[in-house]
Amino acid sequence: MEYRQLGRSGLRISTLTLGTMGFGGTGWAKNVGTIDVDGARTQIDMARAAGVNLIDTADVYSAGLSEEIVGQALGKNRDDVLVATKVRMPMGSGPNDAGLSRHHVISGCEASLRRLNTDRIDLFQVHEWDGQTPLEETLSALDTLVTQGKVRYIGCSNYAAWQLMKALGTSDRFGYERFVGQQVYYSLQSRDIETEIVPACIDQGVGILVWSPIAGGLLSGKYRRGADGNPEGPEGSRHLSAWSEPPVNDEDKLYATIDKLVEIGDGHGVSAARVALAYLLRKPGVTSLIVGARTTEQLADNLAAAELQLSDADMAALDEVSGEPLRYPFWHHRNTASDRLSPADLSQLAPHL
């Protein structure tokens, strides 16, 4: 297992993080998994044995049950790992039970500490943008939590590049703690973040943690185009029913990408899912991939991705099948500014030069 620095912080985290959305598995999270305390303990032990040192959860996962299970499963081993959680989503029906107000950020943190049965949160992330609360208020509350020792590092999730830059600028202006990580969706199914978010994170020293790196299972190799041209997948599979994260906007490209993953996987004697994870681990700016699994077999396969080395030819083939044309102004930068490009610029433009 490799360990990478999280942004500009001194914290080193494993390139794979254990995801816990399936811990508890109530409400909307039931589709992800229904893992109890014993199952969670098994998964945590497997992850730790593989070198994973970060566990990621959120208050909203199964209405707090995921955090409770993480706390119970860790028990006396709490100090041996880093724990990340999140705040922002609705945790009740009251007018202040959601968002990033000072009230909700602080009360949400304290509730998470109780559920996790811990005295601190190693990485406390705002789960989503709140366009109605001033950033000064949110960041001041987060800064207070760090000063109090309840939180050690802060991060954001699902922020657009301009939102991230505004937040970092606000922190710099007032001397508040800065976000050290941004947790975002990124996979071969959708490489949207390469346009603005990845360059912003590289330029500003913000680590990238990736959620759903195999697109919720879409890139596992189990979803293929059938002989009749229609999609086929496991019976009851959520991406062939009502699940819309991630949305599939181009089925032809998706199935071409899956075909290429399976082909490369066959060449290495591994699963398509393992190839999809190994691909992201070589992409610029990526610090860690969050992997969650319904079964221990799936988790073992995901953890093995840390050892898979793809060739440059493998990477180029996957880049080509999943890529999109450069958008303006980036094609113009390629044409007229290629003599003075920064590492942040090259994260997107290098394959096009």
Image (cartoon, rainbow, N blue to C red):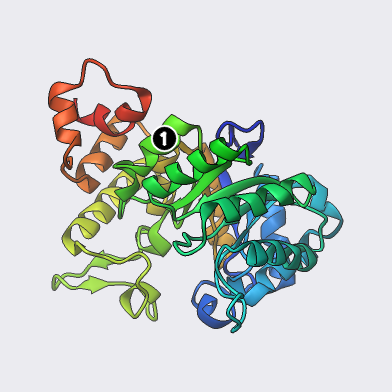
Q: Position of residue 160 (x, y in %)?
A: 38, 51
Q: Is residue 2 above or below residue 301?
A: above
In percent of width and height, residue 256 lies at 20, 54
Residue in view at x 54 percent, y 37 percent: 173
Residue 169 visible: yes
Residue type at numbered disc 1: Arg
Residue drawn at 62 percent across, 47 percent down: 154
Left or right: 52 as drawn, with respect to 311: right
Q: Is residue 277 left or right of residue 336?
A: right
Secondary structure under badge 1? loop
Query: Residue at left 56%, top 57%?
Result: 126
Q: Is residue 194 left or right of residue 177?
A: left
The residue nearer to you, when weighing 180 against 264, is 180
- Give the residue displayed 19% in from the left and 25% down from the top: 353
Residue 45, picture quadrant: bottom right
Residue 261 horizontal/vertical position (percent): 31, 49
**Residue pointed to by mark 1:** 282
**Residue 278, percent across and down?**
43, 42
Q: Residue 258's quadrant in the figure?
A: bottom left
